Amino acid sequence: MAKARAIVKRRKAVRNIRKITKTMQMIATAKFQKSLKRAVGAKPYTLKIRELVGELAATVGDVEHPLLRRPEETGRTNRIALVVITSNRGLAGAYNGNVLRTAMAFIRRQEEAGNKVDVYVSGKKGVSYFQFQRRPITKRLDISDTPRFAEVQPLADQLISQFTDGQIDGVYVAYMNFVSAGVQRPDVMTLLPLASIQAAAKPQDKEIHRKVAVYEFSPDPKSLLDELLPLTVRSALFQAFLDATTSEQVARMVAMKSATDNADKMVKSLTMRYNRARQSQITTELSEIMGGVEAMKG
């Protein structure tokens, strides 16, 4: 009877865990829907800003701006900044592990190339990881689970200031890139310099004969770039935080669904074991009774 009781206790514990994982799955689903709306809603704005700046740079021609400079043009400092975006909570499957592995691989490549990496970490999981690795953290970022532009802007302005002052050669962001609800990829994005916009300013060979629109600027192009280029950096960094938050909720939703399904399977397995144990006990008791009856007859 002791074995059957132990199985009953374990089955009850698994059912309680199943209730918790099912609830967490529902919460993650609700948060994912909210995060998805924010990420999808902000992405067209981010892309349009980059497109607008690219067209402006292409129209002006030779563009000179501190945010477009390359380290080779003003001298290298062999120092870069890396922003690592992780979560504050676990139970999200391989989400944090994938981001941190990608970040560490990037750091090793940069150190092999002779660069020093200043690490800016968002999320308790990332902070704990780098502390365990005994790697110094330049700054711990206090960004809420629902990122707001007002929280991200000071960080972007700080990195822009360091880059324009020549203190660092580049700024990179390690995060989980949200492609779709079924696809999220760990990635390292180049935030500064704005190489993609600078490349867009140079027409490709097959685009040379394409008609180019003529713009009239008011105010002048330099004033527009002074306003739009920092805005491009801020919006790109904010979009990275939105994508990371959405990917985190997807990962947690999938992880909790898997945990719930596994709990269901375990309950069924424990129920079968309990039935077999109970049947074995009943058979043993019947055998003992029949043995006692036979003994009394004798």
Image (cartoon, rainbow, N blue to C red):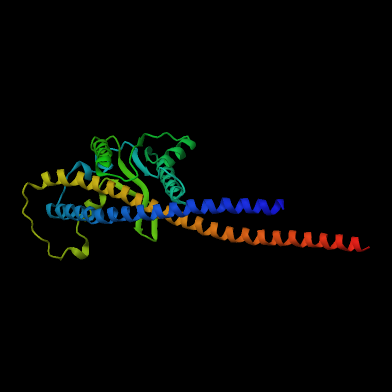
Quadrant housing the C terminus: bottom right
From the viewer's perspective, is 191 left or right of 13? Answer: left
Q: Is residue 93 above or below residue 287?
A: above
Residue drawn at 51 percent across, 59 percent down: 261
Residue drawn at 64 percent across, 62 percent down: 272
Q: Is residue 92 above or below residue 210?
A: above
Q: Nearer the viewer, residue 13 or 84?
A: 13
From the viewer's perspective, is 99 left or right of 56? Answer: right
Q: Nearer the viewer, residue 195 or 87?
A: 87
Q: Nearer the viewer, residue 132 or 278?
A: 278
From the viewer's perspective, is 27 left or right of 214? Answer: right
From the viewer's perspective, is 203 left or right of 218? Answer: right
Residue 276 coordinates in the image, percent (x, y): 69, 62
Residue 64 coordinates in the image, percent (x, y): 17, 45
The furthest residue to the right: 298
Residue 271 coordinates in the image, percent (x, y): 62, 60
Residue 162 coordinates in the image, percent (x, y): 26, 36
The furthest residue to the front: 297
Q: Nearer the viewer, residue 162 or 272?
A: 272
Residue drawn at 28 percent across, 47 percent down: 238
Q: Is residue 206 above or below residue 178?
A: below
